[in-house]
Amino acid sequence: MDANSTHPLAPVALRAEGVHVMYHPERRRAFRAESKKATAVHAVKGVNLEIREGEVVGIIGANGSGKSSLLMALAGLLPIEEGRVMAVAYPALLGVRPAIRRHLTGMDNVIIGCMALGLSREEAYEVAPRVLRFAGVDTHADLPLRTWSSGMKARLVFAISTSVQPKILLVDEVLAVGDAEFRKRSIRRLRAMSESAGTVIMVSHKMQQIRKVCTRVIWLHDGEIRAEGKPKGIINMYKQYAKVLADEMDA
């Protein structure tokens, strides 16, 4: 699929209307001086989104711009202060489901994770070898995850979460893990999923990956959408902004 293609006539898979996310301070005065008043953080400010089936939408922006908070809200893992999110299916956030159990082996985690995604036990055992091979951890399948590196565990999470075709997949920086070959395989898998009418929304600081994978890009700044459109144009706008900002800080 052409990374710059659009799906103007495809059904809407997810819609967000006026979404606000706030982090409220702890109200326990015993743990802070009376003179220091904590204030709420307004992480996402009235975001409106419409994502169609088959789209791969990238969300970019500086650290603290609200990208991960928005993704967590879309997945239903952060409470929304105001607004609403509607979706044709439960959005699966990669890295949160399936939950990794450190005391269990890689094989056990694959079976549990695949069953959590809706596969039967028999189906989970059938796909498990492919999941382990894709993650490049088949030689460690019988070892508990507490003995694995963080990169190995991250690759396994990606492999498990993409072992089935979710209607809506949310991805937060997971393509940054692994070597170059694994990242290429991950990109190919995300493309294949989107071509099967799945919907992918991904957050990443890797502009090259965003440009390769995404059909549309949203630039989030200070909790608000500053621009959205074709990947190349939005990425160039963001890079120019980042360059100007860096020049001003160096001046």
Image (cartoon, rainbow, N blue to C red):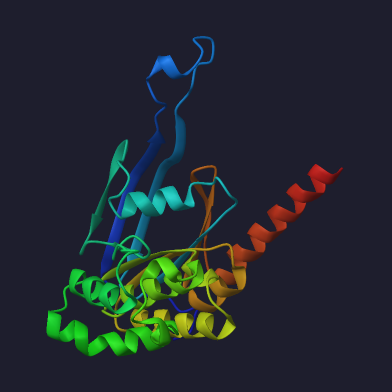
Left or right of 202, for residue 80: left
Q: Against 53, is 247 above or below?
A: above
The quadrant holding residue 89 is: bottom left
Left or right of 86, for residue 221: right
- Front-most of residues 53 and 159: 159
Q: Against 184, is 242 above or below?
A: above
Instruction: Kindly tell me whether residue 166 is visible in this rendering.
Output: no
Instruction: Kindly tell me whether residue 56 is visible in this rendering.
Output: yes
- Front-most of residues 154 and 139: 139
Left or right of 220, for residue 158: left
Q: How many marks?
A: 0
Q: Residue at x 49, y 43 (%)?
A: 223
Q: Residue at x 25, y 87 (%)?
A: 127
Q: Against 151, is 184 above or below?
A: below
Locate the C terminus by quadrant.
top right
Q: Position of residue 173 (x, y in %)?
A: 49, 64
Q: Residue at x 35, y 82 (%)?
A: 141
